Image (cartoon, rainbow, N blue to C red):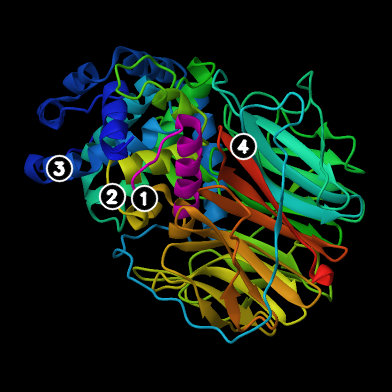
């Protein structure tokens, strides 16, 4: 095992990338797998810091790695995802179920753009898709949410 | 819901709690064993299972290394890059032209057995008529349910019943439709198990689920599209694959894929040099494909129904720097090849090309606009998509001068248009809008001959 990362540099990187990975993975994996996969990616980043540090888009790289890891575990261990149907003490009780009716990409873009507040281009880089594809998924998702929740969402 | 960001954040953070970085780093700074202790119990169990099966994994590593090596030989992997935020773009003013419309809205909502909300996500036109595919859901459903509707005239629609759920399983999410002379094909994602799913009909009336247990493009990465070729159909996308060079940890590599089928039933892999975002067939039968990520719109050509490809147009560079142009949809028209996408400067635009080798920017769309589909007929080009939260449509009579089409009175609220098709003097656009109760599929119909 190689450990070349300086804790300060890695910590700074991990603090910045952790919510993005977690939100992106929350949209395509079960809750526990999303957290495991995020942690798995961060451990991988620590152990391969020399490589990760030099990448143009380390977040996108780690997301892909974590997603594949999560999907492999999901197929082995879990029958189906339960994203969005867990009980949650929210002001908007219909939100989890409404989110569960979105496609994976739609849910991920909502989490990242609307939830985390990062730009569509940053989401595109993270997920490895085009910016307008992000926009399409986002608009479709918001349209679904408007309908199902019967509410107005601020632009 | 006035603060969606707060509620989404609250929801995600409550279901997937943040990882405490300080604790993680503290553990990582120690030896290997404490790292394992930081991992959740189930993860640690998985690691143990993997190590117990190390000889098997070693064999998988060798095979995947060979696959990965072949992928690297085919072409460079596509590494995403960080780019700058969007800039404001103002639409160009087009020349005056006839008004495209009026468009008439049609109801799909009150068909027996349909859910509270409907979406018509795609539409195509073939010899049996129009076929729209989408989904419905009710507030009690976990998964949206796939649906297909057919119409001979674009105004009256028949629902393809699936009471016994032989056609759409849980998680099936139709995304696109295409028609050949012999078959209608709908493709979509399996949101529950991953992969691409195909439905096929010889006549628009009887449908069958083609792939279920062995989904095509077995990955969660969405298929980019389905194209017609002289010898059948092409399915293209870019799943991400893994190389397991170190224990059981995945090293991702881009793996552009292209599958061919003569009939929409049996599919086999054919090679592709890059990831394609759109494929069209020219009048000569050649296939033109748009490359994902290039400094300018870049195309590849195949003269053997997709079996081999040569770079055709515009850009020969692989390195695209911090931004890239992406062609997201193309259509062969009497005026040339019309394409929609985003420039390297992140402007949503419509391009036109005489031969697919060089593209001229014909129209700068509004900053938040997106064109999802383009159709042509009766001397008209019609592009549909969205402009922010609203359905949007643009029309042209030469491919170079475009103007927005008014949809006033055709829908009740927010919505989007996803696809458009033309057949027998009729344009039909499909999408979704917000109705008074729940959502409703948005089907718009226009006959240019009717004035």
- Percent across and percent down for residue A38 are 30, 32
Q: Residue at x 7, y 43 (%)?
A: A8
Q: Residue at x 45, y 30 (%)?
A: A149
Front disc: 4 or 2: 2
The CA span between labels 1 and 2 is 7 Å
Q: State the mark number for residue B161.
A: none
State the extent of the magenta-drawn residues as a range: A135-155
Q: Secondary structure at mark 3?
A: helix
The residue tagged 1 is A123
Task: Tell which subunit mark 2 falls on.
Answer: A
- Percent across and percent down for residue B379 are 78, 78
Q: Secondary structure at mark 4?
A: loop
Q: Is residue A151 magenta?
A: yes
- Percent across and percent down for residue A39 are 27, 29
The CA span between labels 3 and 1 is 22 Å
Q: State the mark number for residue A118.
A: 2
Front disc: 1 or 4: 1
Residue under disc 2 on the same chain as residue under disc 3: yes
The residue tagged 4 is B218
């Amino acid at each position: 095992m190689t450990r070349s990362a300086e804790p300060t540099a890695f910590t700074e990187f991990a603090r910045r990338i952790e919510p993005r990975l977690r939100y992106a993975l929350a949209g395509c994996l079960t809750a526990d797998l999303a957290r495991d996969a995020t942690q798995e990616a961060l451990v991988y980043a620590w152990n391969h810091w020399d490589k990760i540090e030099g990448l143009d888009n380390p977040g996108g790289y780690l997301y892909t790695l974590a997603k594949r890891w999560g999907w492999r575990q999901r197929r082995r261990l879990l029958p189906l995802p339960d994203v969005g149907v867990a009980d949650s003490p929210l002001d908007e009780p219909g939100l989890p179920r409404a989110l569960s009716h979105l496609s994976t990409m739609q849910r991920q873009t909502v989490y990242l753009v609307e939830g985390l507040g990062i730009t569509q281009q940053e989401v595109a880089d993270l997920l490895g898709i085009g910016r307008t594809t992000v926009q399409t998924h986002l608009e479709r998702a918001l349209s679904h949410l408007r309908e199902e929740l019967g509410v107005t969402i601020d632009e | 819901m006035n603060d969606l960001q707060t509620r989404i954040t609250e929801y995600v953070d409550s279901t997937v709690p943040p990882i405490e970085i300080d604790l993680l780093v503290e553990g990582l700074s120690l030896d290997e064993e404490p790292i394992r202790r930081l991992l959740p119990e189930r993860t640690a169990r998985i690691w143990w299972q993997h190590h117990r099966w190390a000889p098997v994994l070693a064999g998988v590593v060798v095979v995947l290394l060979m696959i990965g090596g072949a992928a690297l030989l085919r072409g460079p992997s596509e590494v995403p890059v960080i780019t700058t935020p969007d800039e404001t773009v103002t639409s160009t003013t087009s020349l005056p032209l006839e008004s495209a419309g009026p468009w008439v809205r049609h109801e799909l909502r009150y068909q027996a057995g349909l859910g509270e909300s409907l979406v018509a996500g795609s539409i195509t036109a073939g010899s049996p008529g129009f076929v729209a595919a989408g989904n419905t859901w009710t507030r009690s459903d976990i998964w949206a349910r796939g649906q297909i509707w057919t119409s001979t005239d674009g105004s009256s629609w028949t629902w393809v019943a699936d009471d016994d759920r032989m056609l759409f399983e849980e998680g099936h999410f139709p995304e696109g439709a295409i028609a050949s002379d012999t078959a209608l094909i709908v493709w979509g994602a399996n949101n529950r198990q991953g992969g691409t799913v195909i439905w096929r009909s010889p006549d628009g009336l009887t449908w069958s689920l083609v792939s279920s247990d062995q989904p095509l493009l077995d990955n969660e990465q969405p298929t980019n599209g389905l194209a017609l070729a002289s010898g059948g159909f092409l399915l293209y996308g870019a799943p991400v694959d893994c190389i397991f060079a170190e224990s059981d940890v995945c090293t991702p590599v881009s793996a552009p894929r292209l599958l061919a089928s003569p009939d929409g039933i049996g599919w086999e892999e054919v090679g592709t040099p890059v990831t394609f975002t759109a494929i069209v067939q020219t009048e000569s039968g050649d296939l033109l494909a748009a490359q994902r990520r290039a400094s300018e719109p870049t195309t590849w050509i195949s003269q053997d129904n997709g079996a081999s490809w040569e770079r055709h147009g515009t850009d020969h560079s692989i390195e695209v720097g911090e931004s890239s142009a992406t062609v997201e949809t193309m259509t062969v028209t009497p005026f040339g090849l019309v394409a929609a996408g985003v420039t390297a400067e992140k402007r949503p635009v419509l391009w036109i090309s005489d031969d697919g080798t060089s593209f001229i920017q014909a129209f700068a769309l509004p900053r938040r606009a997106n064109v999802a589909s383009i159709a042509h007929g009766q001397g008209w080009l019609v592009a549909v998509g969205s402009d922010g939260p609203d359905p949007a449509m643009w029309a042209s009579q030469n491919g170079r001068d475009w103007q927005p089409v008014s949809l006033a009175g055709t829908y009740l609220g927010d919505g989007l248009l996803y696809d458009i098709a033309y057949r027998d003097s009729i344009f039909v656009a499909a999408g979704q809008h917000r109705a008074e109760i729940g959502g409703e599929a948005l089907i718009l119909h226009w006959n240019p001959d009717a004035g």
